[in-house]
């Protein structure tokens, strides 16, 4: 299981609740689950969004923007498309807008 980036501590705490962790992360972890080797965030509507590492998130941005999911998308549309694909990371909107501008 390859752990990195922003969700490492969340996954460690989900696997071992005795793991010492900050209080704010304990509150956030209620919205996350582990299924198999992947971590997911519960969406507002109850759907599970797969949590991506920084590298996988960049690859997803490139694929959505460069035309695999249609022609060049703007930031907000890219975020919407990624959510429809069931993908999540905390800075998704900022990253989509920054990538579309570049």
Image (tube, rainbow, N blue to C red):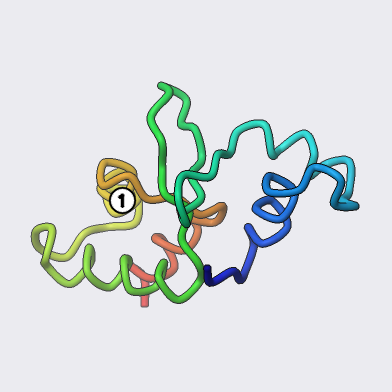
Q: Residue furthest top?
A: 45
Secondary element type, mark 1 = helix
Q: Nearer the viewer, residue 91 or 30?
A: 30
Residue 42 location, x and y as percent?
49, 33
47 w.r.t. 50: above or below:
above
Decide if residue 18 is on the left or right side of residue 1: right
Residue 18 location, x and y as percent?
86, 45
Name which residue lies at 46% across and 44% down. 35
Number of residue marks: 1
Decide if residue 12 is on the left or right side of residue 51: right
Q: Nearer the viewer, residue 92 or 47?
A: 47
Image quadrant for the C terminus?
Answer: bottom left
Q: Nearer the viewer, residue 22 or 102?
A: 22
Residue 23 figure quarter? top right
Decide if residue 16 is on the left or right side of residue 67: right
31 w.r.t. 72: above or below:
above
Disc 1 crowd rating (10 Å Cα; few below 14, some 14-19, many 20+) is many
Residue 20 location, x and y as percent?
90, 52
Residue 39 location, x and y as percent?
51, 50
Name which residue lies at 55% across and 39% down. 33
Name which residue lies at 58% across and 39% down. 32
Name which residue lies at 38% across and 71% down. 99
Residue 78 figure quarter? bottom left
Which residue in the structure is indicated by mark 1?
82
């Amino acid at each position: 299981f390859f752990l990195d980036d922003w969700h490492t501590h969340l996954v460690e705490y989900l696997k071992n609740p005795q793991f010492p962790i900050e209080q704010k992360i304990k509150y956030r972890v209620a919205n996350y689950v582990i299924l198999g080797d992947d971590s997911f965030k519960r969406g507002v509507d109850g759907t599970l969004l797969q949590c991506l590492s920084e590298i996988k998130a960049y690859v997803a941005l490139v694929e959505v923007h460069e035309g695999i999911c249609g022609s060049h998308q703007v930031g907000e549309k890219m975020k919407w498309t990624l959510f429809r694909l069931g993908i999540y990371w905390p800075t998704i909107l900022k990253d989509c807008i920054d990538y579309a501008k570049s």
